[in-house]
Image (tube, rainbow, N blue to C red):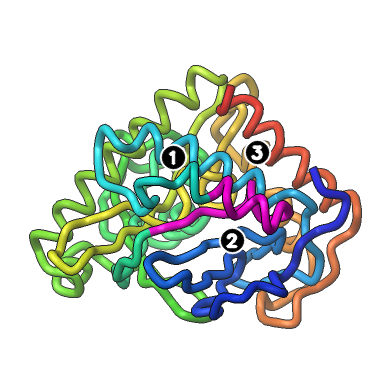
């Protein structure tokens, strides 16, 4: 793992076409180069500090899942991905293990969220309304309780600021009924794939989000990242106990620290102490070691 966090990518001879909270995307001509930096975001705000090697962990976990996801859906990696990444590594070794070379696709304007447990914004929704967004739930559920079945709860995909829940009817109108049904079905299948593998590793996959794009023919592809600590809540199975927040392998450790501060979740971000940074990175590495083995 690198000693210093990579917060931005400089010196590449390719046009930068997008810079997100974590990833930077460059145009290679026939494909995009997607590089995962070591930036950390929470509540849709990028922190000042990074986690050295986090982008490598995220990329390698995603590549593991993309290989498994081929049984369920198309994905965005180019066909000769391994060879092209090896060639990139010869010129830019610092980018080899944190990069993906991907097809040029049109991202859908929603994020596909699947929840198996009552946590995060889902728990807040339940406390306020007795429902998980649009879904009726049994009464008196505890925080972190397992849901009767996994539920698909899409969100808007904001260019900046917070993604917001959107009901399934509105999401279907936004992307088309046929596309929506395909996204929902594939997302639930991918979630169950993640649940099964995580369970083998002694981990509960509480919830996750997927992103999808389409090609010129309208065919659906899984894109971005898959079942990583940035896009998912991973809980240790051995300590699971409904009734409150759970220990986690993801960036909930950062969120919990930020929730303890008098911060309105708007930029600028407060500084993160070394204990939070190292504790979060260790959780990412442990999730990788348990799942990808």
Q: Which residues are magenta?
A: 85-102
> Badges 1 and 3: C-beta atoms under 8 Å apart?
no
As rendered, which of 67 and 158 lies closer to the eye? 67
The residue pinned by badge 3 equals 249
The residue pinned by badge 1 equals 117
Considering the numbered disc 2 on the image, is that residue within a helix, a strand or a loop? Answer: strand
Q: Decide if residue 184 is on the left or right side of residue 272.
A: left
Q: CA distance from mark 1 to mark 3?
A: 16 Å
Please provide percent x and percent y for residue 187: 29, 46
Quarter where residue 269 is shown = bottom right
Residue 188 is at least partly visible in this image: yes
Q: Main secondary structure of the magenta part?
A: helix
Q: CA distance from mark 2 to mark 3?
A: 22 Å
Q: Is residue 290 above or below residue 77?
A: above
Quarter where residue 263 is shown = bottom right
Q: Nearer the viewer, mark 2 or mark 3?
A: 2
The residue pinned by badge 2 equals 35
Of labels 2 and 3, earlier in sequence is 2
Q: Nearer the viewer, mark 1 or mark 3?
A: 3
Please provide percent x and percent y for residue 235: 59, 34
Of labels 1 and 2, earlier in sequence is 2
């Amino acid at each position: 793992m690198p000693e210093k966090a990579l917060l931005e990518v400089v010196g590449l001879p390719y046009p930068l076409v997008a810079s997100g909270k974590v990833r930077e995307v460059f145009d290679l001509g026939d494909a995009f180069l997607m590089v995962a930096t070591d930036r950390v975001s929470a509540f849709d705000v990028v922190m000042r500090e990074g986690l050295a090697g986090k982008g490598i962990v995220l990329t390698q976990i995603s590549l593991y899942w993309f290989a498994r996801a081929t049984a369920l859906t198309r994905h965005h990696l180019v066909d000769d991905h391994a060879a092209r990444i090896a060639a990139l590594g010869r010129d830019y070794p610092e980018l080899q293990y944190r990069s993906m070379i991907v097809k040029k696709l049109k991202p859908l304007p929603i994020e596909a969220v699947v929840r198996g447990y009552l946590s995060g914004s889902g728990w807040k929704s339940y406390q306020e309304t007795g429902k998980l967004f649009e879904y009726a739930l049994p009464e008196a559920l505890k925080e972190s309780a397992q849901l009767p079945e996994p539920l698909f709860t899409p969100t808007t995909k904001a260019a900046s600021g917070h993604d917001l829940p959107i009901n399934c009817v509105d999401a279907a109108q936004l992307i088309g009924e046929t596309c929506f049904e395909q996204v929902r079905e594939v997302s639930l299948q991918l979630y169950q794939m993640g649940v099964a593998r995580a369970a083998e590793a002694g981990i509960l996959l509480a919830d996750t989000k997927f992103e999808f794009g389409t090609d010129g023919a309208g065919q659906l592809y899984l894109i971005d990242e898959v079942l990583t600590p940035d896009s998912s809540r991973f809980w240790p199975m051995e300590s699971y106990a409904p009734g409150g927040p759970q220990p986690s392998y993801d960036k909930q450790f950062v969120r919990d620290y930020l929730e303890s501060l008098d911060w309105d979740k708007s930029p600028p971000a407060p500084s993160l102490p070394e204990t939070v940074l190292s504790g979060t990175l260790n959780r990412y590495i442990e999730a990788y070691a348990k799942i990808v083995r």
